[in-house]
Image (spheres, grey):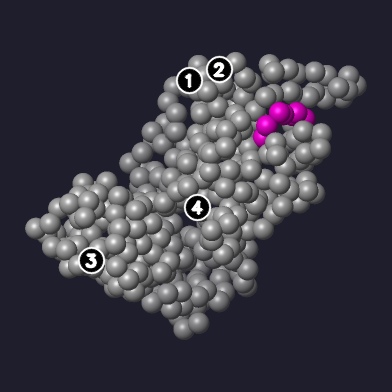
Amino acid sequence: MKRETVVVNKQSSETTTIVDYLIVGGGYAGDVAASALRKSSRDSSILLVSDEEDFPYHRHQLSKEFLLGRRSDKEIMLRRGNFYETQNIEVSLNERARRLIPEEYSLETDKSIIRYEKLLIATGARPKKHDCPGSNLEGIYYLRTIEDARRFRRLLQAKSRVVVVGGGFIGVEVACALSELGMNVSLVIQEETIWEHLLGTEISQYFHNKCTNRGINIIASEEVQSYHGDKVVTAVQTRDQRLDCDFVVTGIGSVPNTEWLTQSGLIIGDGLMVDQNMRTNDPAIYAAGDVACIQDMTLSSPYRTQHWDAAREQGLCAASNMLGGSVAFEHTPSFFTSIFDIWMDQIGIPNRFDSVVVRQKSPDSFIAFYLFGQHIEAGILVNSSADYKALRKLVVNKVCIKDTRALGDMERELGSIAID
């Protein structure tokens, strides 16, 4: 089916667009899916609708390279030049989805009505907002979009006092970036050490110490009770401390963008519920990225994976199945971060482990293996990216290590352990 536009109401000039494949959401998952659809279906019509002003970009760079001014707007775009035009992928920016009517294969936006054959929902998530006294004051910022980052960058001045709230990746990355810019940074976290819930106490202490040694004031095992100021925030109150500030950056989690789907008949939990084929309860509708919550029959509860590599793999999986395939999403999570002079890769999630073995190359270069019994559940590499492939093989295959001391033995090649 070719793309068509027809007038359905001559008095109001309201039009309906008809496409083969409709993608709602301009993030990584939507972009990857659009490209995959075009690669396999040269003659179909593809329309990507995004409520942002910019073409799809690398969102994970906002809290690091872009915030520090080391990457320009163009440099963080997912595609260079006129990619979408040459691939005949139509992109409609500044267009927000309002209502979905699956039985009519129809989407209503704030600009038009779009009918589709297959639909991918990739509307992502938005920052969770604090709900406490003073949380509506000006000067409290949330970092999610490139426009958020642009506004935020205009505020950055050396010696400013800033409070960052949240001990996840975004909070810690922003705190470190602002510290590099010469700001006086306080970081409020709920855990005893940063990333403790991700890495465990032993390894998280390494990153915690790196941050404190670089001058970041970490207020651990605390929560924000209230914000204070007249119209603009001037202080943050935790249970035990009052922190004066010029502004606040908050990163306390995300909420999937599903409100516009509440009357659609699609099943919604912690996100839009999909099966392992990324298909919703409507056979013509798929979801991918931060908005998708996967019901995996091998796991006890559905899960939502909020990482760039998952968005990519889910977008590819959804596109393949929209084209008539039957691909199941099977994925070992992996992600990366960088703070100061440290680059960390993580493969797998150490949801369960009873021991950690460290292969120490130098004080700031090591590999940590998370084991459950003798099986490798997950691992991280700190300034050791050359060992990424070998570690990934160990984690993906959940290799059983007969003698776990071999993991820490620098004389043994990781590749040979994987073969064992």
- The residue mark sitting in front, 4 or 1, is 4
Quadrant of residue 189 in the image? bottom left
Give the mark nearest the N terminus, 4 or 1. Answer: 1
Residue 354, compared with residue 327, is above or below; it is below
Quadrant location of the N terminus in the rendered image:
top right
Name the residue rendered at 13%, 63% in the picture: 409
SS for dot 3:
loop
Start-end of magenta stretch: 113-119
Give the mark nearest the N terminus, 2 or 4. Answer: 2
- The numbered mark at residue 306 is 4
Q: CA distance from mark 3 to mark 1?
A: 53 Å
Q: CA distance from mark 2 to mark 3?
A: 51 Å
Q: Which residue is mark 3?
A: 402
Q: CA distance from mark 2 to mark 4?
A: 31 Å
Query: Which secondary structure class fits the magenta region best?
Result: strand
Q: Which residue is mark 1?
A: 82
Q: CA distance from mark 4 to mark 1?
A: 28 Å
- The numbered mark at residue 42 is 2
Query: Where residue 330 appears, x then y in whole percent?
Result: 48, 47
